[in-house]
Image (tube, rainbow, N blue to C red):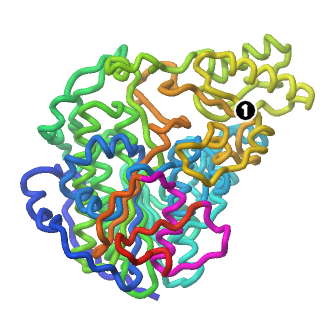
């Protein structure tokens, strides 16, 4: 059994640092020089798996020339600019469930952030223990129980219990999906500090981090710095009663809600991960450890302000520094590690700005496609109504529609036929499929950009949880009938702006390669497993091992 080392002291101001200032960059600049290629001869002792929530391949391409710290390091390794979350359910929980399991949501069982459970008569959260009477969909008792596939950390601990499996994020669902069922430490942000699973106590590191956050958030902070290259994006976009496009993330004293939805939460996440390096400790023996870190602020910023405003530009600069600080901390400790960075899904900008940029098809959801409107229309057409409440649950965008319980088989058949016909007749709808139709579709293994819409939905279809009907809105139709503060845009479609994400691998000694061929996020787990010598039976993964060596050697053949 490993003993934790004493926690090093740290400053409360760290979580509110303004990365990108002059004093941050010089120390990291020499590390960016190209070193001679020397292929690693032994398995890494630590796997660092980084997810950037809502980090589309489009954002990566747009900002890669400006990265100067963390991403600049990763860009020296194996770069796959066209990775894919191959499935259609491009939401946080399904996407995170693929990253370290190596299988699609159809096998992880995590088909959405929430799904309707007819037996309970309510929505269920993807990282919820709904059997606990204290749990609700909005305030869940957090659990990884819905995840049906083991993560890489689970498999390593199964092979050798000395391997440590640690996960940290602002979001509980990211921790549950990347850490899996056997985490030695698991932390996410809730309320005014980091929390963990029921029945576990906060460690010294988590307690100290929460004290530091109380002090720094209590003091407030000025605007975050705007890099010069963000200036062209600094303009107001009116969205009805509010506007976006010029916000700088000033923090009022004690405003934890704004703090947790800003670039500063990424800095705090990096902070927590760095202290766990020492507290566990990680990467110190021959049993390989896994540290999963999911940075959530890109998603929060994308939802609240869209992807093409100054807010996202500031977030990209701040994220680069937070990732760089984590990598610097790994180097300072002399750890032998491999890092992979990808994303759970991408995103799209607010349709109002897309129209200004020459995309006239961009639109918000037709109100007739909401569950309530569809329920009323189909009930009127068929004369069939639910015993209580609406006839349908879900709908409203590219995703699942569940029928209310209590309908007779003949009624269900009639209602489904009427719903599918109505959806297909709507000019915003690209397709609609019944559960029986999706059950008959085989999930392909070819290049993910060539999959049909039905194949994309099949990759995230689970007969026990998915809807009775699944719908897809057309490209650039953004779920939500109107913008509201905090939700200017969103994701969840089967289109490539939501599916395509970067995948970056880096390890000291790996040669740089730019690999433009399409790959999948389910390829990450088998690739990392090969590096640490973990062999699993055929059929364990939906993905394949990627040769990231960059030389004549094959990193998949170890």
Image coordinates for residue 529, horizontal then vertical, percent:
51, 73
In this picture, is 446 found above or below 496? below
Q: Farthest front residue? A: 552
Quarter of the figure with residue 387: top right
Q: Is residue 323 left or right of residue 50?
A: left
Q: Is residue 529 magenta?
A: yes
Image coordinates for residue 412, horizontal then vertical, percent:
85, 28
Which residue is denoted by mark 1 in the rendering?
A: 433
Observer able to see residue 480: yes
Q: Which residues are magenta?
A: 517-542
Residue in front for this viewpoint, 104 or 175: 104
Under circle 1, the secondary element is strand
Q: Is residue 208 magenta?
A: no
Q: Is residue 11 left or right of residue 52?
A: left
In this picture, is 149 found above or below 157? above
Quarter of the figure with residue 228: top left
Q: Is residue 518 left or right of residue 339?
A: right
Give the residue displayed 8% in from the left and 61% down from the top: 26
Image coordinates for residue 69, horizontal then vertical, percent:
20, 57
Give the residue displayed 54% in from the left and 84% down from the top: 160
Observer able to see residue 212: no
């Amino acid at each position: 059994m490993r003993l934790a080392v004493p926690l090093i002291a740290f400053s409360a101001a760290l979580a509110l640092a303004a990365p990108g200032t002059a004093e941050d960059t010089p120390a990291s600049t020499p590390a960016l020089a190209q070193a001679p290629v020397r292929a690693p001869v032994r398995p890494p002792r630590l796997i660092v798996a980084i997810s950037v929530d809502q980090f589309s391949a489009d954002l990566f391409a747009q900002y890669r020339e400006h990265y100067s710290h963390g991403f600049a390091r990763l860009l020296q390794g194996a770069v796959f600019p066209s990775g894919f979350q191959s499935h259609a359910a491009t939401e946080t929980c399904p996407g995170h469930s693929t990253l370290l399991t190596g299988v699609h949501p159809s096998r992880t069982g995590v088909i959405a952030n929430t799904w309707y459970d007819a037996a309970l008569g309510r929505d269920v959260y993807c990282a919820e223990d709904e059997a606990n009477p204290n749990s609700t969909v909005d305030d869940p008792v957090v659990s990884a129980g819905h995840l049906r596939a083991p993560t890489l950390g689970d498999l390593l601990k199964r092979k050798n219990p000395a391997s440590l499996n640690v996960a940290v994020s602002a979001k509980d669902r990211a921790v549950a999906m990347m850490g899996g069922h056997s985490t030695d430490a698991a932390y996410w942000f809730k309320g005014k500090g980091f929390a963990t699973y029921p029945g576990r106590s906060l460690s010294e590191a988590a307690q100290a981090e929460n004290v530091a956050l109380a002090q720094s958030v209590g003091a407030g902070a000025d605007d975050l710095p705007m890099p010069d290259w963000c200036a062209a994006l600094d303009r107001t976009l009116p969205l009805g009663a509010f506007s976006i496009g010029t916000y700088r993330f000033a923090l009022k004293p004690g405003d934890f809600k704004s703090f947790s939805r800003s670039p500063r939460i990424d800095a705090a996440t990096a902070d927590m991960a760095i202290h766990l390096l020492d507290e566990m400790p990680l990467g110190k023996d021959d049993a390989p450890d896994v540290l999963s870190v999911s940075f959530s602020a890109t998603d929060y910023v994308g939802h609240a302000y869209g992807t093409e405003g100054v807010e996202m530009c500031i977030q990209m600069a701040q994220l680069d520094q937070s990732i760089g600080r984590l990598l610097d901390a790994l180097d300072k400790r002399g750890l032998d590690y491999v890092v992979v960075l990808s994303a759970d899904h991408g995103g799209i900008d607010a349709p109002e700005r897309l129209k200004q940029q020459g995309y006239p098809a961009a639109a918000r959801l037709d109100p007739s496609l909401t569950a309530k409107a569809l329920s009323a229309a189909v009930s009127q057409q068929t004369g069939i109504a639910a015993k209580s409440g609406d006839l349908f649950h879900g709908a409203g965008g590219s995703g699942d529609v569940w029928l209310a319980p209590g309908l007779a088989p003949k009624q269900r058949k009639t209602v489904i036929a009427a719903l599918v016909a109505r959806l297909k007749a709507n000019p915003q709808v690209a397709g609609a499929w019944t559960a029986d139709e999706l059950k008959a579709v085989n999930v392909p293994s070819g290049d993910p950009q060539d999959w049909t819409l039905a194949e994309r939905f099949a990759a995230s279809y689970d007969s026990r949880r998915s809807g009775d009907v699944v719908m897809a809105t057309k490209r650039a139709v953004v779920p939500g009938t109107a913008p509201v503060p905090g939700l200017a845009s969103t994701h969840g479609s089967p289109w490539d702006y939501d599916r395509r994400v970067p995948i970056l691998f880096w390890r000291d000694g790996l040669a740089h390669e730019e690999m433009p061929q399409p790959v999948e996020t389910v390829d990450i787990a088998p690739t990392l497993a090969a590096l640490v010598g973990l062999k699993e039976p055929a059929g364990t993964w939906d993905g394949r091992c990627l040769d990231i060596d960059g030389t004549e050697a094959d990193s998949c053949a170890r």
